Amino acid sequence: MLYSLICTLCIFLPCLTLMGEVVSQADTYTLTIVKPDAVAKDHIGDLIARFEQAGLHVAGIKMVQLSQQQAEQFYVVHKDRPFYGDLVRFMTSGPVVAVTLKGHDAVQKARQVMGSTDPKQALPGTIRHDFGESLQRNAVHGSDAPETAKTEVAFFFSPSELIK
Ligand code: RTP
Ligand code: MG
């Protein structure tokens, strides 16, 4: 009796654990942008390495010079904020690198790696603390929620440009 119980547990527990892993670690996507300040300072590789070191994978990457219309559309959520015009000017001031990242809890994980919007408030070891110049020139963009991530990834990448 005891022997068969142990055998049953030995068979089913690893299966349950494996199922849990598969369910809880399903990959999600997020969009990050290496902003013009970080591109100009040759920090593209440094920034992407930070995400990779946190367990995220590059699923798509491209360098882009945003037009004014594209930057206005991308940041349309901020169109009534006082910094909108400056933000659009900054984001069109030079090339950016758009990167789709893939991994478990990608949006949240990428935001942790980035740190707070204002580099002065960001924790040491985060991208914005280590590479950001100011509240505006803060090195990196990251999607703020899974729904936003879907729209932002589609803004830069067609499905065929992403590694599944
Ligand atoms: P992001 O969208 O770029 O990932 O940044 P975030 O979510 O941390 O911050 P958000 O509130 O969405 O702001 C978007 C970007 O606008 C610039 N900003 N300037 N008061 C200001 O001058 C100001 N506040 C925000 C920053 O470049 C910020 O990342
Ligand atoms: Mg934002």
Image (cartoon, rainbow, N blue to C red):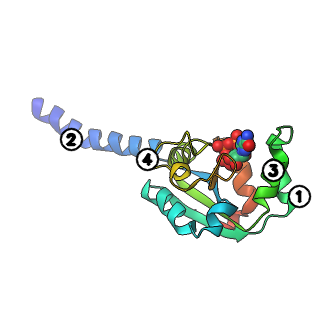
Q: Residue at x 51, y 60 (%)?
A: 57
* Callout 4 crowding tier (Cα within 10 Å): few <14, some 14–19, many ≥20: few
Relative vertical location of residue 97 with respect to residue 152 in this rendering, above or below: below
Q: Residue at x 67, y 69 (%)?
A: 62
Q: Nearer the viewer, mark 1 or mark 3?
A: 3
Mark toward the start of the polypeptide (2 vs 1): 2
The residue wearing badge 4 is 22
C-alpha separation, residue under disc 2 versus residue under disc 3: 61 Å
C-alpha separation, residue under disc 3 versus residue under disc 4: 44 Å
Q: Nearer the viewer, mark 2 or mark 4?
A: 4
The residue wearing badge 1 is 69
Q: Is mark 4 within 8 Å of ligand 1?
A: no
Q: Amino acid at mark 2?
A: Cys
Q: Is mark 3 within 8 Å of ligand 1?
A: yes
Q: Amino acid at mark 3?
A: Asp
Q: Amino acid at mark 1?
A: Gln
The residue wearing badge 3 is 86
The picture places residue 14, in percent across and down from the top left corner, at 28, 43
